[in-house]
Amino acid sequence: PNYVIPKECSYNELLIPTSDSIRMNYFLHLNVSRMRHVLFTGPTGVGKTANVIKELNDFYYNPTCTNLITAFSGQTSAN
């Protein structure tokens, strides 16, 4: 469906769904529901961290699940 930008949303809070982010969120839900660890890699600035944090906070913020976020700099390669 077409994405409608919420009027109360500020620019830095926007996460526009793309085919890649929808695919990534699908695999996140698939693995988390089976209690498996997940690692997403890819180029800098494509929204991996923002999408995963949003999904975890929206759907898995409870005493059963937790997450560990490891931050890398822009100089770190995916390899």
Image (spheres, rainbow, N blue to C red):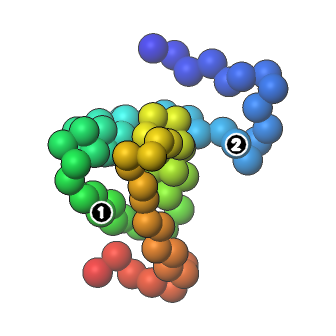
Q: Quadrant of the C terminus?
A: bottom left
Residue type at mark 1 is: Leu
The disc label shown at residue 13, or none: 2
- Residue 4 visible? The answer is yes
24 or 32, which lies in front?
A: 32
Category of crowding for the residue at label 1, using alpha-carbon neighbours closer than 10 angstroms: few (below 14), some (14–19), many (at least 20): few
Q: Residue furthest bottom?
A: 75
| Cβ atoms at labels 1 and 2 below 8 Å apart | no
Q: Mark 1 points at which residue?
A: 39
Front tag of 1 and 2 = 1
Q: For the point 79% across and 22% down, which residue is it?
A: 7
56 sits left or right of 26 in the view: right
Q: Residue at x 47, y 42 (%)?
A: 62
Q: Is residue 55 at all visible to an observer of this figure?
A: no
> What residue do we see at 76% from left, 32% from top?
9
Mark 2 or mark 1, which is nearer the start of the sequence? 2
Residue 23 badge: none
Quarter of the rendering containing residue 68: bottom left
Mark 1 residue element: loop
Give coordinates of residue 1: x percent, y percent: 45, 14
Q: Where is residue 41 drawn, in percent x and y?
A: 33, 65
Residue at image position (36%, 40%) is 25
Is 2 above or below relative to 9? above
Q: Badge 2: few (under 14), some or many (20 or more) residues near its Cα, within 10 Å?
A: few
